[in-house]
Amino acid sequence: MKKFFAILATLCLLLGAVSVHADEAAATAAEPLSVTLDVLNRGADAFYGCDVNISIKDFIALGFEFGDACNVVLENELYRYEFKSVPFYNGYYTKTGDPLLCGYGYAIKENRGEDYQYTRTDYPYLRFCYNNREMWNLLHLTTDMKCTITLVKQGGYEYEQKLVGGLTYSKNFEDYEAKNGFTKEEVFANFRAVKSEAIKENVLFRSASPFDNANNRAPYVNELAKANGIDYVLNLADSQKKIDQYKEKEVWAQLDYAQQLLDNDQVCLMAMSAAYEGAAYQSALVKGLNSALAHNATKILFHCTEGKDRTGFVGVLLESLCGATYEEMRNDYMVTYDNYYSLTEASDKTAFDYIVELKFNDMINYLLTFDATLEAQGDGTYDLASVTPENYAAAARNLLSKAGMSEENIEALIALLKK
């Protein structure tokens, strides 16, 4: 009998041990994927977010995937910020002011868990930011903060990621071709005259940077600016410090026209962030436009790095000021997506419409807040079908005026650009 109870006791101990291990395993399995990282610095691009101390490749290796929904906490002894259901994207696919984790430059793969191809070298670290808003400054972020990222829904934004996640581009000139009346050089350089029935021909141009060769486009923009007789440049992206850094690169010797424009004081260095809603962006723009007028410019080129985000809003503003239609402004804006990504309404209407709503209409709806005669809908947007070119022109004029541009200079700018 004693032997029986001894065996029974042993079995109970074994079953108890198995139960404990099972509970521990279940608890471990239930723990969400999470990582706590150091905040390194303000991101070194126009979006003014924060870099965190992990490469995009290593973040993916932990088990996170593009299209995941994550909770993010930023904190130190003074501040704690918590963000719910933040998307992890390989591009800036949120609306203005919405947070995202950005691994810019990785080409997505079809199946989860496959290797990702790194196509650019701009982002050595994972970045957490607002889209087109200065998170670092607005939240008083500092390098003593910790950033905790927790997976809350695998593939929570998978649809959006797959829809436009393939929008990565090559830095190789040979990968491009002439199309839609543009030469191969113009397509690669994202260089064009802004076209509208409301704007004079060959007065206003936009492009990628003729100074910053990070994407191998500067020499091509340099030659096109020279060929088109550009006599003033609104450099939305750079400071003098950055220009000095570019001059140390071997490629600078090819940028003779860019150097000539700098030497002749025909460039305004504006060093703008992507936060087009902000006073700093708008006052810098007014400074640049005033400078162009003071230098009696007749052919103005405006650019950022790619000629896409900061350049995009300046294009919308100046076209609106002259009375361009919604369709003209949209078409001009989306040429950039054709140039870089071969995305057109014909190639992929769903993705095209998504970008128009996400990017272009976001800019348009913000601009229209400057026309007091219009009434926003319940979601803060406007019925764009009922908005007229006169509304766009009034909104653009009011924005420039509130940003500090004199009525005299607004009229001079209109006289320069408008047919």
Image (cartoon, helix red, strand yellow):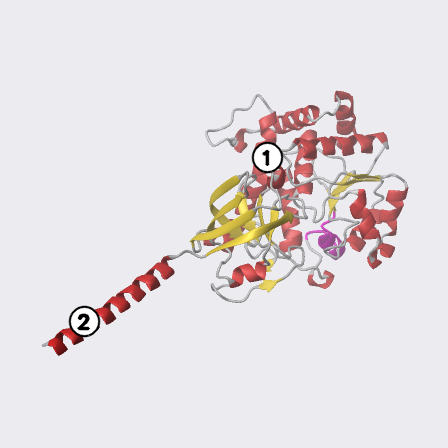
Task: Identify residue for label 2.
Answer: 9
SS under mark 2: helix
C-alpha separation, residue under disc 2 versus residue under disc 1: 76 Å
Q: Residue at x 80, y 55 (%)?
A: 219
Q: Indicate whether 182 appears above or below 194.
A: below
Query: What's the mark number on residue 178?
Result: none
Left or right? Give the position of 217 relative to 255. left
Q: Residue at x 62, y 41 (%)?
A: 136
Q: Bounds of the magenta span?
A: 180-191
Residue at far front of view: 2
Quadrant, the N terminus: bottom left
Q: Indicate whether 195 appears above or below 400.
A: below
Task: Identify residue for label 1.
Answer: 364
Kindly indicate the quadrant of the structure image that contains residue 59. Answer: bottom right
Q: Is residue 188 magenta?
A: yes
Q: Is residue 94 magenta?
A: no
**Circle 2/circle 1 CB separation < 8 Å:** no
* Residue 237 visible to an observer of this rendering: yes
* Residue 94 visible to an observer of this rendering: no
- From the top left corner, tell me how far across and down residue 371 is, in percent: 60, 24
- From the top left corner, tell me how far across and down residue 133 is, in percent: 60, 39
The residue mark sitting in front, 2 or 1, is 2
Q: Residue at x 75, y 48 (%)?
A: 209
Left or right? Give the position of 124 relative to 153. right
Q: Residue at x 64, y 36 (%)?
A: 276
Q: Amino acid at mark 2?
A: Ala
Crowd class of label 1 (few under 14; some 14 to 19; many from 20; radius 10 Å): many
- From the top left corner, tell me how far across and down residue 27 is, in percent: 34, 59
